[in-house]
Amino acid sequence: MDGDRDWEGKDRGRVVNRGRRRAPRRKTAITSKGLLVGAGVVLAGGAVAAAVTVWPGEGKRTPAGAGSTPERTSVGAAATPPSASPSPSRTYPLSEEPRTVPAVREHEAARGPGWKPADGGRVVVRNAALADEGRLTAGELGLDYAGEAKPRDGDVELALTGSGKSASEAYTLTVGDGRVRIAAPAEAGVFYGTRTLKQEVRGGGTAPEGVVKDEPAKPQRGFMLDIARKHFTAGWIEDRVRELGDLKYNQLGLHFSDDQGFRIESTSHPEVVSEQHLTKAQVRKILDLAESRHITVVPEIDSPGHLGAVIAANPELQLRNAQGVAASGAVDIADPESAEVVDELLDEYADLFKGAYWHLGADEYRALMVSNPEASYPQLAAAARQKYGAGATVADLATGWLNDRAKVMRGHDRTVRAWNDGFFRGGSVQPDTSIQVAYWTGKEIGARPPIEYLSAGRQVINYNDEYLYYVLGEPNQFVYPTGQRIYESWTPRVLRGTTAVPAQYDDQILGGVFAVWCDLANRQTEAQVAAGVRMPLRALSQKLWDPGKPALGWAEFRELSAKVS
């Protein structure tokens, strides 16, 4: 090893975590690659040493800004004063597993001082594509960003092990030989590795020696925000994006059209936009920030229901029953102009939101929330028979509407999803098999249990309203969800109520989304919403990253969350 390394300073930064032992299914291996020879260490075949000899007083460094920020706090014993002769050799204890939110899946323990930010330390990248991750991490840890440079003592190195185009979110974080290396097949994995390092430093000042091998259990990990019923400022949404990124979420849903408001600037239909709204420039800034955190924004224009704001500016589109009574928020899907307006909006916002996913809504269409849709809405029944044959129903016409909107968005190369109560049993028309099911409830008329979708081979995303719905004002028997309840009793297989579906369907469940709905918009301020969702978001991040029983109890998890995130 280099003779100018400050072993005394590194020993001073050693942190012993006192968390419980990980669950047995997580592997902890001991690396034995070092041999103690006289006053030095010989490394064989790897960068992590099993034993280290400490020489006090040589090349001592003081960590940059030690104690000035949570990211750079030193924790540990006081340093041994320099002496004229070397102290006896010593061996470090095995490192303990990092304490992060979400917890890492695997850690190979090793003996050594670990790593912490120090004067002269840098972040270097082996691939120019990682410049954004490098600059962000350097700023957060108080290090210099050196770009594409050869790593040296004290540095953090970021590297791609593949083309960067892989869908993998796995990463490896290695702490040893006085430096950190984060490597992954794709940029997202490298970013998640930097989040782990940031939390390690925030929580204890030092990243423990050894190797973290980590990846999420579920590919879709989201937070959905109803900005249609309640206007949220662009700055508040940006703060949530930063929070989501640090917790390794990869989706932000924006439900921006509903009966109460339409909240993003429009050029195709400016008449539908609410007075309080986000400009496209503000949205682009949010999108740029989200992209830098490897978060995809999933927009939702719900139809053919929940279009009250569009109908207010286009009243001729409103659905009316046989007695001429208007159906709240519903457009007449027998009228070709309804499809024309909605498709123009879809086309417009597809140019703004470039992500891979789109939410089509399709829930709570008023014509299908009555006991006899054909009798109540004869014009819809007639249109269904004309389009699909003598036996067709209003549900068939609504399914055809969903398929047509899905076709529009597939033309923009989007993967689409719809709420589960927009899918119906039987009928002559079936939803396109590529439409993912956003399962939120079993309470609606016609709602089907999750097993029906799964047994048919459909992909499902968990929005379970029993655990994952934060509804402002708590109307309709909703109560604010707690992080503890999610942490202790929810898993991605708990799609409806509190009962999990069989494990054989686990791969079809793509992940989960925590949803904020603003039914009673003024019941909470932005600050109250942020505080209310804080622990549920952390609990959900843990269960989507690893759905097994957590190693920490809830009180320990809550305490850890306060330290690291």
Image: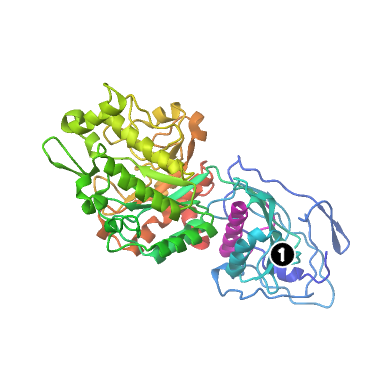
- The secondary element bearing badge 1 is classed as loop
Note whether 44 is above or below 417 in the view shown: below
Give, as a three-letter code, the residue at label 1: Glu
Quadrant of residue 284 within the rendered picture: bottom left
Q: Which percent across, then down, holds residue 401?
A: 33, 36
Between 415 and 19, the residue placed more toward the observer is: 415
Residue 328 counted in the magenta span: no
Q: Say if the magenta span includes residue 204.
A: yes
Q: Compared with residue 102, is residue 547 higher up or lower down, i.e. above or below?
A: above
Task: State left or right for residue 280 relative to residue 171.
Answer: left
Q: 193 or 350, which lies in front?
A: 350
Residue, far right: 38
Label 1: few (<14), some (14–19) or many (≥20) C-alpha neighbours in 10 Å: some
Q: Is residue 546 left or right of residue 322?
A: right
* Main secondary structure found in the magenta portion: helix
Magenta segment = 187-211
Quarter-of-image position of residue 142? bottom right
Q: Is residue 451 positioned above or below 259 on the image?
A: above
Of all residues, the one furthest to the left in this rendering is: 323
Residue at the (75%, 49%) spot, across then down: 31
Give the residue displayed 29% in from the left and 50% down from the top: 258
In the rendered view, how is the structure colored?
rainbow
Residue 120: percent from the left, percent from the top? Answer: 70, 73
Residue 194 point in image, percent of width and height: 61, 59
Q: Is residue 127 left or right of residue 468?
A: right
Q: Is residue 123 visible?
A: yes
Q: Which residue is pictured at 62% across the width and 68% down the height? A: 138
**Residue matched to label 1:** 148
Of residue 331 and residue 510, the one placed in the foreground of this image is 331
Rendered location of residue 264, percent (x, y): 35, 58
